[in-house]
Amino acid sequence: SVVSITSTLRSGSSTGTGIIMSEDGYIITNDHVIESAVAIEVLTSDDRVYSASLVGSDATSDLAVLKVEATELAAAEFGSSEDMEVGDSVVAIGDPLGKELRGTMTDGIISAINRDLVVNGRGMTLMQTNAALNNGNSGGPLINAYGQVIGINTMKMSSYYSTASVEGLGFAIPISTAKPIIDELILQGYVSGRPAIGIS
């Protein structure tokens, strides 16, 4: 249920991870994984490659939904992030540093719940974990002890935020926060109610 995502940009490319949401090809990832992409490619765990279209994205929540033309994909099972407590075991799956290490699993615990952080100028409420996350893990699942997706990995704290060496500070979007946004992106391609100037 975990896929590799390659975004072709006007100058170079970027990689990330995604989660198969439904058997008919809807895939969840982070907005920053596909931001400014002119083409998006999805690689499944059984080495099938698909060209993906962007259904909708939302920079404020850092969520995006892609669609590939496929059937009978292995959809992930989703749990409840609201049932998670500090100390609960979790694992993360993703592509740290790119496709060469795709499908890497790391384990840890929920370190904190409802962390309010400012990410690229926007406030987000995230779950904190000490499961190792690296560049390329973005958009991948944070999974509970029952194999259910309870979060979408979105960032790690690094020396960018501090002059000290930082380890074991990863963050995921709770699935309870993400689901209504994902549903709205699938329904209409954007999240309504966001303030805008109206100039493009």
Image: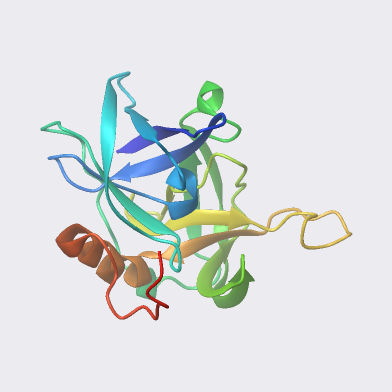
Q: Residue at x 10, y 32 (%)?
A: 71
Residue 47, quarter of the rendered image: top left
**Residue pushed farthest right?**
163
Of residues 120 and 169, which is closer to you in this image? Answer: 120
Q: Is residue 55 left or right of residue 124?
A: left
Of residues 200 and 154, which is closer to you in this image? Answer: 200
Give the answer, above or below, for where 142 lies relative to 110.
above
**Residue pushed farthest top?**
47
User: Can you give x and y, in whole percent of width and height, for residue 189 in the image?
Assistant: 23, 59
Residue 70, quarter of the rendered image: top left
Of residues 70 and 164, which is closer to you in this image? Answer: 70
User: Can you give x and y, in whole percent of width and height, for residue 188 in the image?
Assistant: 18, 63
Give the answer, above or below, for where 97 lies relative to 200.
above
Q: Residue at x 35, y 65 (%)?
A: 175
* The C terminus, quarter of image: bottom left
* The N terminus, quarter of image: top left
User: Can you give x and y, in whole percent of width and height, for residue 190 in the image?
Assistant: 27, 64
